[in-house]
């Protein structure tokens, strides 16, 4: 009989562990392929943010920060109250030790998880697993105590190590989410995470040593196969012999006990991937490996027979167990946002940059050296004196077009016939006959010498001052009548309903719009129009037009009373 050397034994053990790991990898790849086909489309429809203005989502201990943030006294929003996760999982549970484990054997788990931040969360998990295995390697030396106590003789009786084990594990794990902080997309329908934890476990391992009649098994009939491909045949033969008995010898390596079972501290590492099904549900695939300071989970210590006379040498090697699972998780909690590992913490900052709803944007301050209300970059006359009326380009107004700006013009309205004017803007009018009073200005046509008759009024919508299409048609007919009556002058009058700046400015805007339309669009001489605004006793949304009577005097344009008021068209 050939017994493997220590090096051969270790190599075979490593190969066994690699094969078991490969099986789990293929299982996870299969699950991932299925979910990638069926569920990955969820990413485009998931929601992952929350209304940061909703104070009901903020716990009371963070309301002070929340209020400071809303009042722009603190830069960072308060962390919202987020839901707990409750999960249940099923999968394969296997012990990776000295005896090859059957595959698959069942396991299940349940956990609760709570986020401490967007990346780190804590999870408490209970795991229950059942594992079994039969060794393909014959043993005649270095027999375990369970065999020796049952009467097996070293060097004479062949045995095959076997076991059935039930493991219960309770652990607290730190979970790190790896991909919810995203710079180029708002949300994700899939998160990848890793975990590391500490806990405690108890196990109940038994070995099938004797038949139901308490007789020794005869394993000498088993054909020994050392070839890897033929080991299954050896295991099958051993299983057929063991079918007549039961796992009747409890393995106990001593040490601490809990519930009459060996208790050991455990350390867990693992990784997983979760797919969001809805804002409440997600499906997770996970693989965990747990290490314990015990070598008897599979019923036998790692040992190599080196002394045919019956001695044995024990080498330090501890068993580990693996749980590969698929689970369904549900988010629980009211008036809370989703668990923070599903939320991109950059979502608020990016949305605020794209469409500000909270940040205070300062009003732009544009240089205006001459203080005329027109920024320097648009001011075509940047040095107008203080108080001088200017147009929208910053150019000093010249109401009568005599070449003297209004702020210098001592005769603001000089008729064209009286121009050119002197340096003070004063013109000289000829007086050919009695139609002039005091040789200064041609009389306006009166009621007796103007046959234009009654003129229509122009209506405006509330707060509007632009001439509408309907009003343009009415003013076109007024212009035709003016052209047919060249001696007629027209008074253009608007009204105010209240003594406010905005009402006065609106009244001025409407008269100015009507006169500009008649002059610029219809070619009526501005000298034939008299500008009156801010009157009382009329319809506030109407501009009246009437023929001028004797005594009706006034300019055809006047400076705006409040030019810097914000206005709408």
Image (cartoon, helix red, strand yellow):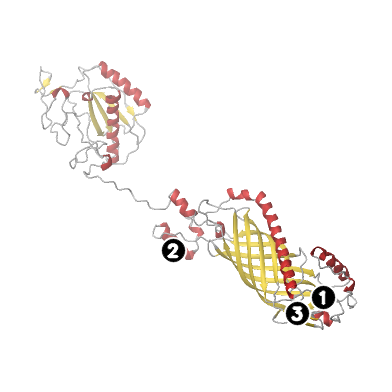
Q: Reply above or below: 172 against 91.
A: below
Q: Where is residue 200, by image quadrant?
A: bottom right
Instruction: Say which residue label 3 marks.
Output: 252
Q: Reply above or below: 498 against 176.
A: above
Q: Is residue 38 left or right of residue 181?
A: right
Whole-angstrom CA distance, mark 3 to mark 2, is 57 Å
Q: Is residue 156 left or right of residue 313?
A: right
> Crowdedness of circle 2 by 10 Å Cα count: few (<14), some, many (20+)?
few
> Crowdedness of circle 1 by 10 Å Cα count: few (<14), some, many (20+)?
some
Whole-angstrom CA distance, mark 2 to mark 1, is 71 Å
The secondary structure type at the circle numbered 1 is loop
Residue occupying the point 9% across, 22% down: 439
The secondary structure type at the circle numbered 2 is helix
* Image coords of residue 77 (percent x, y): 45, 59
* Image coords of residue 453 (percent x, y): 27, 19
Mark 2 in CB contact with mark 1 (< 8 angstroms): no
The answer to which of marks 2 and 1 sits earlier in the sequence is 2
Q: Where is residue 419, by image quadrant?
A: top left
The answer to which of marks 3 and 1 sits earlier in the sequence is 1
* Image coords of residue 52 (percent x, y): 48, 55
The secondary structure type at the circle numbered 3 is loop
Residue 64's tag is 2
In which quadrant is the C terminus drawn?
A: top left
Residue 272's tag is none
Instruction: Say which residue label 1 marks.
Output: 139
Whole-angstrom CA distance, mark 3 to mark 1, is 21 Å
Q: Is residue 359 visible?
A: yes
């Amino acid at each position: 009989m050939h017994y493997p050397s220590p090096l051969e034994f270790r190599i075979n053990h490593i190969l066994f562990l690699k094969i078991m790991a490969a099986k789990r990898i293929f299982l996870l790849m299969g699950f991932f392929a299925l979910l990638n086909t069926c569920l990955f489309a969820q990413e485009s429809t998931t929601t992952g943010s929350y209304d940061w203005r909703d104070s009901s989502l903020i716990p009371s201990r963070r309301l002070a920060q929340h209020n400071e943030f809303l009042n722009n006294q603190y830069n960072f929003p308060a962390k919202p109250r987020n839901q707990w996760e409750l999960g249940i999982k099923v999968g394969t549970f296997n012990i990776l030790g000295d005896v090859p484990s059957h595959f698959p054997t069942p396991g299940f788990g349940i956990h609760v998880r709570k986020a401490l931040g967007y990346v780190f969360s804590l999870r408490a998990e209970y795991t229950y697993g059942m594992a079994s295995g039969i060794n393909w390697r014959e043993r005649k030396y270095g027999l375990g105590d369970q065999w020796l106590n049952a009467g097996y003789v070293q060097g004479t009786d062949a045995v095959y190590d076997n076991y059935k084990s039930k493991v219960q594990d309770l652990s607290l794990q730190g979970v790190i989410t790896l991909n919810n902080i995203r710079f180029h997309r708002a949300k994700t329908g899939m998160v990848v995470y890793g975990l590391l934890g500490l806990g405690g476990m108890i196990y109940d391992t038994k070995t099938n040593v004797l038949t139901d009649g308490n007789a020794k098994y005869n394993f000498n009939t088993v054909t020994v196969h050392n070839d890897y491909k033929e080991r299954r045949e050896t295991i099958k033969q051993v299983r057929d012999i063991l079918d007549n008995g039961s796992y009747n010898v409890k393995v106990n390596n001593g040490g601490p006990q809990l519930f009459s079972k060996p208790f050991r501290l455990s350390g867990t590492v693992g990784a997983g991937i979760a797919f969001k099904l809805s804002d409440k549900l997600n499906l997770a695939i996970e693989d965990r490996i747990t290490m314990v300071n015990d070598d008897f989970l599979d019923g036998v210590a790692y040992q190599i027979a080196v002394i045919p006379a019956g001695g044995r040498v024990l080498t330090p090697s501890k068993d580990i167990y693996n749980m590969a699972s698929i689970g369904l998780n549900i988010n629980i909690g009211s008036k809370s946002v989703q668990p923070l590992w599903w939320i991109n913490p950059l979502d608020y900052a990016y949305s605020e940059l794209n469409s500000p709803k909270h940040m205070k944007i300062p009003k732009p301050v544009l240089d205006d050296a001459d203080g005329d209300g027109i920024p320097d970059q648009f001011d075509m006359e940047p040095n107008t004196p203080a108080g001088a009326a200017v147009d929208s380009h910053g150019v000093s107004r010249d109401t009568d077009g005599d070449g003297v700006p209004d702020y210098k013009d001592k005769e603001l309205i000089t008729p064209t016939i009286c121009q050119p004017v002197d340096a003070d803007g004063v013109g000289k009018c000829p007086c050919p006959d009695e139609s002039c009073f005091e040789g200064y200005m041609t009389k306006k046509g009166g009621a007796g010498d103007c046959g234009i008759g009654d003129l229509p009024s122009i209506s405006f919508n509330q707060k509007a001052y632009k001439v509408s299409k309907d009003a343009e048609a009415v003013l076109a007919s007024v212009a035709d009548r003016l052209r047919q009556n060249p001696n007629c002058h027209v008074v253009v009058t608007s009204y105010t309903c209240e003594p406010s700046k905005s009402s006065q400015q609106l009244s001025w805007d409407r008269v100015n719009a009507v006169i500009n339309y008649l002059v610029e669009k219809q070619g009526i001489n501005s000298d034939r129009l008299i500008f009156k605004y801010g009157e009382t006793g009329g319809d506030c949304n109407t501009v009246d037009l009437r023929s001028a009577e004797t005594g009706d005097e006034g300019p055809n344009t006047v400076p705006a009373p409040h030019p810097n008021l914000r206005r709408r068209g």
